[in-house]
Image (tube, rainbow, N blue to C red):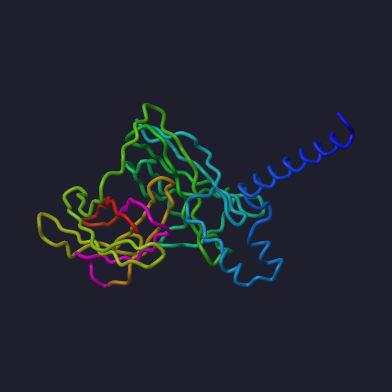
């Protein structure tokens, strides 16, 4: 083959290769983050468009230098066994200075990943910063623990999460349809209100017993009720706070703001006649 022809073929091959590479790059997206690129070009509108939403609580094992460190990896389905963990601070040492929120330094939630199991407990902390609580679960499977706390050095609280397992035959259950009524022992609880993603939603829960309204609820952790929302799938966590109320039932009013569309498990803790009861609901947002 003549030299000009060979050179022409080689040049054509280079064009094809570079064109293919350019196409793959367009499919994969730019290597420079768009927000950073907009900032470099001084595009104020671009920066606003690329604002990163805040990560919902419980999805991370560490945040802002704080890290949840489980010291127990398995849960028992027979007898109660100590669940031990600690929080490591930004200085690399176990955290020992906590602020008191809702009468406790730390609230611990343990939930089965299919939302068929839920426990809200309060471990004790030793001088070295290790938390411990006796715990057992009813069914084998995959679980998630959530530590809800505020370090004394911070103005805002943290919710850190970690996975746990209970050995055995794990058979996850679907979350099921929307459920606005629930039984909690001898009590019946109903839910009114809808979840709207990104907006504060008013939720009213009404407690009755044998058809009669319960009007003498007892304060539990500084309120007449506590509500936790967990998003089905990734278990994004939201600790909902009750609105101020001087009435001990039958209605408990909350303001909830969920981060996205989806299905949520709602878990209400309330106290009456000296005992704490939990009612579970299923709600959708969006």
Left or right: residue 189 versus residue 146 is: left
Name above or below for residue 237 compared with residue 144: below
In magenta, the rendered stretch is 246-267
280 and 258: which one is in front? 258
> Is residue 160 at least partly visible in the picture?
yes
The C terminus: image quadrant: bottom left
Q: Quadrant of residue 217?
A: bottom left
| Furthest-left residue in this view | 211
**Residue 273 location, x and y as percent?**
20, 56
Q: Residue at x 31, y 40 (%)?
A: 174
Does 126 lie within the magenta span? Answer: no
Q: Residue at x 33, y 61 (%)?
A: 195
249 and 178: which one is in front? 178
| Furthest-right residue in this view | 3
In this figure, what is the number of numbered marks?
0
Name above or below for residue 8 compared with residue 127: above
Left or right: residue 176 versus residue 146 is: left
Does 257 lie within the magenta span? Answer: yes
Q: Residue at x 23, y 70 (%)?
A: 247
**Residue 80 location, x and y as percent?**
38, 35
Q: Quadrant of residue 165?
A: top left
**Residue 55 location, x and y as percent?**
51, 56
**Residue 160 location, x and y as percent?**
51, 51
46 and 121: which one is in front? 46
Left or right: residue 113 versus residue 151 is: left
The N terminus: image quadrant: top right
> Is residue 278 at least partly visible in the picture?
no
Left or right: residue 164 versus residue 15 is: left
Q: Residue at x 37, y 49 (%)?
A: 120
């Amino acid at each position: 083959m003549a030299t000009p022809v060979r050179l022409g073929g080689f040049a054509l091959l280079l064009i094809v290769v570079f064109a293919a590479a350019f196409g793959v790059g367009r499919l994969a997206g730019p290597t420079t983050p768009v927000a950073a690129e907009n900032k470099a070009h001084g595009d104020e509108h671009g920066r606003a468009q690329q604002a990163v939403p805040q990560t919902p609580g419980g999805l991370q094992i560490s945040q802002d230098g704080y890290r949840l460190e489980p010291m127990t990896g398995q849960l028992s389905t027979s007898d109660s066994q100590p669940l031990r963990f600690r929080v490591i601070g930004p200085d690399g040492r176990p955290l020992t200075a906590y602020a008191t929120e809702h009468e406790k330094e730390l609230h611990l939630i343990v939930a089965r990943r299919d939302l068929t199991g839920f426990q809200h407990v309060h471990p004790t902390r030793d001088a070295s910063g290790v938390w411990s609580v006796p715990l057992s679960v009813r069914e084998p499977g995959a679980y998630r623990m959530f530590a809800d706390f505020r370090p004394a050095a911070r103005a805002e609280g943290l919710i850190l999460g970690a996975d746990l397992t209970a050995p055995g035959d794990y058979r996850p259950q679907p979350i099921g349809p929307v459920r606005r009524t629930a039984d909690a022992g001898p009590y019946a609880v109903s839910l009114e209100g809808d979840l709207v993603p990104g907006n504060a939603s008013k939720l009213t829960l009404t407690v009755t017993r044998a058809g009669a309204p319960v009007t003498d609820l007892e304060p539990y952790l500084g309120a007449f009720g506590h509500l936790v929302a967990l998003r089905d799938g990734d278990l994004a966590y939201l600790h909902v706070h009750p609105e101020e109320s001087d009435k001990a039932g039958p209605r408990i009013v909350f303001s909830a703001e969920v981060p996205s569309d989806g299905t949520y498990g709602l878990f209400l803790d309330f106290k009456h006649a000296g005992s704490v009861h939990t009612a579970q609901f299923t709600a959708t947002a969006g």
